[in-house]
Amino acid sequence: MDVDIPTSSLFKDSPDWSDVTPIYESEEERAAVRIKYDEEFRDCFGYFRAILMSGEKSERVMRLVDTCIQKNAANYTLWQYRRECLQALGSDLRKELRYLDEVILENPKNYQVWHHRRAVIEWLGDVSAELPFTKEVLDDENKNYHAWQHRQWCVRRFELPAQPELDYSLKLIMEDPRNNSAWNYRYFILQRAGRLTDKNTIDTETNLALQLACKLPNNESVWSYLTGMLAEDGLESRPEVITAVKKVYEETEKDARSFHMLAFLVEVLLERMGGEKKEEQEGARVVMESAEEAKKLLEELTVIDPVRTNYWNHQRMLVESQLQRALLTATK
């Protein structure tokens, strides 16, 4: 009767590695930071330590590194040595990209593997597969920081055209207006394209943000984007925006008002109070009117946003200070 004899998957039992003496962690290392791991982990990293000492770069080392990555894909030294092996062996970089597709899809938030992918793309000088790949990752989780960072790098490094990326970001925003990553990416593309000083662009982007802000007033992302669009010329540069926001404020029940909306209105008032006035008396009048309105909003904010009560109280003290100075000016 034939009996199947199990074969070991350990490197220490492989004839191909009989010429290498593994270097295991010392007792001192184990005592300092005791980590629970299995025998396969100890085995492959013992041989990897030995390879680091010898400097060997070969196909068998690449297979060893593969095994180690399966055990700990976040180990920086593994990826660094893998890059050295790829260069020394003149490996097929397209094959490496296919390998990275699998690793990233299994470890989508692993910084080291994204960094390795960037290095491979640099060597290839070809970014054609990257936007479709990041889209695949973002389809699974549309706020994956590493995928967005990689996409930004691709745009910068290879000077990719702006319009397809604007179309892509708009698609994601329409699918999920609360996707802060998509808003940030859209701002990045516009900034890189030098379009944040273009009046037509600012008008279009402001209208987009304003519509979504009024529709979803509790969406912090859109308020941040709207503020960014108006930053260059000032929050009061488009009175129709302030009018629309105030209308939403007034039509919303007090308990249901968004603190993001209130904070935006406070910023408008603070900007107005700090603006240059041609006449001292006129300036004092504007400050007094704006201060009274700001105080009311800040008091409301301390109720609906209790987490930042201390901040809003601090802002109210600053407003009070400006109001006192304005009152002194008005009585001169």
Image: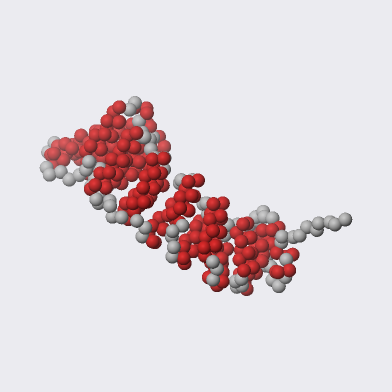
Q: Residue at x 24, y 47 (%)?
A: 200
Name the spot of residue 98 as percent of width and height, x first: 54, 58
Q: Is residue 53 above or below residue 212?
A: below
Q: Residue at x 26, y 40 (%)?
A: 268
Name the spot of residue 16 as percent of width and height, x first: 70, 69
Quadrant of the image occupied by residue 61: bottom right
What's the colour scheme? secondary structure
Question: Number of numbered discs present?
Answer: 0
Q: Is any atom of residue 295 visible in this view?
A: no
Name the spot of residue 36 as percent of width and height, x first: 67, 54
Image side of residue 7 versus residue 271, left or right: right
Name the spot of residue 282 as percent of width and height, x first: 13, 39
Q: Quadrant of the C terminus?
A: top left
Q: Which one is in front, 332 or 161?
A: 161
Q: Which one is in front, 264 or 239?
A: 239
Q: Quadrant of the N terminus?
A: bottom right
Q: Is any atom of residue 64 visible in this view?
A: yes
Q: Is residue 103 above or below residue 312?
A: below
Q: Residue at x 54, y 71 (%)?
A: 90
Quadrant of the image occupied by residue 64: bottom right
Q: Residue at x 81, y 57 (%)?
A: 4
Image side of residue 93 versus residue 248, left or right: right
Q: Single out the residue that lies furthest toward the right.
A: 1
Quadrant of the image occupied by residue 212: top left
